[in-house]
Amino acid sequence: MSLLGLLILLLVATENAGAAKAIVIFSPNWATVFTKESVTLTCHVDSSAGGFSWYKDGVQIRSEQKYTIGSAQVSDSGRYQCKSQSSDRSDSVTLTVSNDYLALKVPPYVFEGDNVYVFCAGYAGFHAEKADLKKGNMFIASSPNGSFQIGRVTMATSGSYTCYRTVGYYSPYNYVSSADISVKELVRTPQIKVSPDDQVTEGDHMTITCDTKLSPHRETTELQFAFYRNGHNVQEFSSSNQYGVPSAQLEDSGNYCCEIRDQSGSVKKESDPKNIRIQAQKLSGVSVRLEPAGGQVLAGEKLEILCSVEKGMGLLSYSWCKQSSLSCDTKEAAVLEQRFVVESVSEDYGGEYQCIVTRTATGDSISSANISISVQGMILMQDRSFGNIYVLIGIGVTLTFAVLLAVALLAFKYRHRRSGDSVHKAQYRAGRRQQAEDQQTSNDMTPEPEYDNMVFQDVSHTNNVCSTYFYINQQTASSSSSPVNNNDEGSVIYAAIKSKSTRTAKNQGEPAESLYENFSAK
């Protein structure tokens, strides 16, 4: 086959894929008619597309949507089908044209739940007596006019039916006519489908669908759905064909089935059970957090341990275990985090620990990495306390020293002010004495010095006061251009006056004020 042919076949198959099937409808709705009676056949499709075709015994005969047989003949008997451009060819429907005096007329289509009646009809214009109806050898009923109400049928209604009736004009005869009633399925037996279809894991959103399909002849029939797990109803009848579980749990596992029914309740069908097992969610992501962090604590301090898992369902058992002693503190709760509190850590609490989380329902467990905890003893705590005391003592000593220094400076300043006047007086007397001595030793050869720029400094030594003053001898403008003595140019005289109390001076034979040395500047 050429590539073009393959493409054409593919195109045709694509266009017809999923196309609706046409339906043949009889009016009046009898599969058997007498000769010379009229019957109309209609090709029913969902879409409004044209291009209708009729087939009798597989041969195309007409090209319109409705095909009317105005005066039926025996030759019009046969299997009829139709189609449109947008639909598949319909199922075949048999039309029987009878030339007898009696005919049992039944509908061409009979579906579960249909309210069916049949007619044991005599040929038009002939008198007919009461009629009897049997199914096989079982008598069903008698009817004066030949009409029989079968009621709402089930699949068990299918079978061969026979009617008996006397028909004649002048000389009536007993006639018999038979017809088959084939009850078709209104709706397909439902099936349970679950989503996700690969595997439902704990915590997943699970959707269970009651999957079925109505016959195209009865596609407008309203259905109701109910769901059961292990024989117990989990969702009452409603128009929804789905049952949803937002967060599937292990207890949602079981055998599920669904039931469908029509509005009248005459048609009921139940699916086969389907076993659905919810896969337990694996524990994962266990972690431990300590407060205080780092794993080093002081004896007597409070320690908090927070053990958590990233994923976990249901009741969880948290165990905080010391590996060396295999002793554990265990708590159970349906939470993802558990807290352990040690109000006062003992010195022997240190060691390697683990947090072990166990799923109560499944026994599944997961352990954290080893957590090292080191406890520092009471001696170190005392050392720290003593260290703090030492710091406080140092701060106190520093503050005390600062206060004493401030007081000493204030006292020194106060004494300096009081001794200032006496120092000036002593300085003046010493200066006059020194002036007289200088005048005698110079033999009138040196100019009279000028005293200027005197600097005083008091130094306190216990009870004595040492006063120091300076004389700066500068050359006057009237002096000779060359000094007599090199040391006379800018000479500086240093004098020290040692002041003692009167009693001390008398005892030692020293004056209260003494001139100790004179120095000349180099």
Image (cartoon, rainbow, N blue to C red):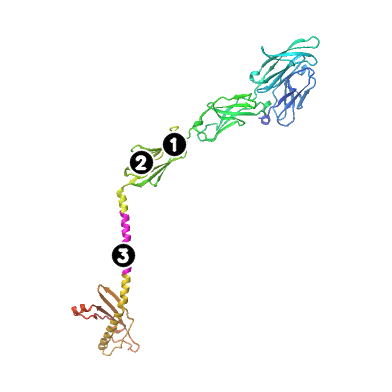
Neighbour tally class for label 1: few under 14, some 14-19, many 20 plus, Cα within 10 Å? many
Q: Quadrant of the N terminus?
A: top right
Q: Residue at x 30, y 88 (%)?
A: 448
Per the image, the residue denoted by label 2 is: 352
**What is the spatial separation of the Cα atoms under label 2 and label 3, in whole angstroms?**
52 Å
Q: Is residue 275 magenta?
A: no
Q: Circle 1 sits in a helix, a strand or a loop, which is it?
A: strand
Q: Is residue 396 magenta?
A: yes
Judge whether 112 appears above or below 470 on screen: above
Q: Quadrant of residue 103?
A: top right
Q: Earlier in the sequence, mark 1 or mark 3?
A: 1
> Magenta span covers which residues?
386-407
Circle number at residue 316: 1
Asked whether, in this view, residue 194 is left or right of residue 282, the answer is: right
Judge whether 369 appears above or below 157 on screen: below
- Residue at the front extreme of this rendering: 144
Q: Circle 3 sits in a helix, a strand or a loop, which is it?
A: helix
Q: Circle 2 sits in a helix, a strand or a loop, which is it?
A: strand
Question: Which amino acid lies under the numbered mark 2 shown in the image of this protein?
Answer: Glu
Asked whether, in this view, residue 328 is left or right of residue 468, the answer is: right
Residue 395 location in percent, x, y? 33, 60
Residue 328 location in percent, x, y? 37, 38
Residue 75 or residue 188, whichever sits in front:
188
Residue 291 or residue 232, whichever sits in front:
232
Per the image, the residue denoted by label 3 is: 401
Q: Quadrant of residue 289?
A: top left
Q: Quadrant of the C terminus?
A: bottom left
**What is the spatial separation of the Cα atoms under label 1 and label 3, in whole angstroms?**
65 Å
Question: Which amino acid lies under the numbered mark 3 shown in the image of this protein?
Answer: Phe
Residue 461 location in percent, x, y? 26, 73
